[in-house]
Structure formats: structure tokens, C-alpha cells
Amino acid sequence: MIKKGFLVLFLLTLFAGCKSEPYIERNAFQLDTSDRTLALLTETRWDKPIRKKLAWYGFPVKHYTLAKKGATENERKSAARRAGIRYGLRIIPGEVVDQCIANKSAIKFDTFRIELIDLRKDEVELIIEKGGWIETCPLASPAFNFTPLFQELIETFVKQWW
């Protein structure tokens, strides 16, 4: 009987996985939520999936239309201000700590950080940071307890916006 109880407890722990909440630091007491257009201030390989997720939630993200490819963050900030955009988004990927053998596009980051910058005040208003897999890796995470990293970051961003 005791062995059976330990086995059940072990299996529940194994399949539950370790799900942690994203780190959130909010400096703004109230964001101006009337205009959800954001300017992407950095260029990373992960811009496109993040822009798609934000657009799905009703946040249009301006990127290449603001400044030429290869522009610095300050050049992008200036272009966004000229375009009348209030908030900028800085994407800061951490280190890649694992890549899935069974799914080559599944990469695990130690941390991935999104910063919301008020372009009028030039201050960071919101920081969201978390590590994890960007896609399902069948060998590393149970599929029934899995939320892709970008989806979790953007859902947290949307909740913090309101």
C-alpha cells in the first residue's frame, strides 16, 4: 500500500512538471492604454513570432517601417517618436541552454526578456522575463503541461497592459 502511494506521488510529480510564473517588474502606475501601437526597438531573430502574437491580441507592432534595417535602438526610438508612437518594445533573448533533438525549432532559453519603454519619458515601464522552451520538445516537457515561452510572455504582457 505504501509503495503504491509513493508510486502515485512520484508519477504526479513527474507529469506535473515545474511551471513557474514570469518575473514582472512594473514601474508605471498607469499606462496610457488608448493607443496599443508599439514600436519594436531591437532586431532579433525572434521579432516575427513575437510581433505575430502581439498582433493577434490587438497590438500592432511597427518595425521595419520606422527605420532602416540595422538601425540602432536610438534611431528607432527617434523614428517612433516622429511617428507619434508612445511605447517601444525591447526584446532581449538570453542564452540558449538546450535544443530539442526531436524538434529542431524547439529551443530552450535560460531567460527571455521583454521591456516596455515609454518613449516620451524614455523610461522602462514594464519588464517581463522568463525562461523556457519556445516550442514543444517531446523529450523534455510533457505536452499536456506546456505553454510555449513566447505565448506565456505575451499573455503576461497583455494582462499587465490592462
Image: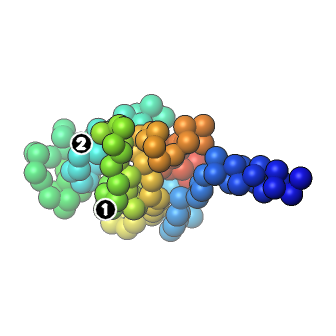
Which residue position holds label 2?
A: 63
Q: Can residue 82 be seen?
A: no
Q: Is residue 141 above or below residue 143?
A: below
Give amino acid for label 2.
His
Percent from the top left, x then y, of residue 29?
57, 64
From mark 1 to mark 2, how far is it between C-alphas? 24 Å
The residue most toward the top is 56
Say which residue appears at 86% left-offset and 57% top-offset.
2
Q: What residue lies at 60% left-to-right and 37% top-to-bottom? A: 144
Q: Looking at the image, can residue 91 be seen?
A: yes
* 18 left or right of 58 in image: right
The location of residue 154, given as percent across then percent down, is 47, 45
Residue at the spot of label 1: 95
Color theme of the render: rainbow
User: Which residue is situated farthest in the right direction here?
Assistant: 1
Task: Indicate the amino acid at tag 1.
Answer: Glu
Comes first in the chain, label 1 or label 2: 2
Q: Nearer the viewer, residue 16 or 43?
A: 16
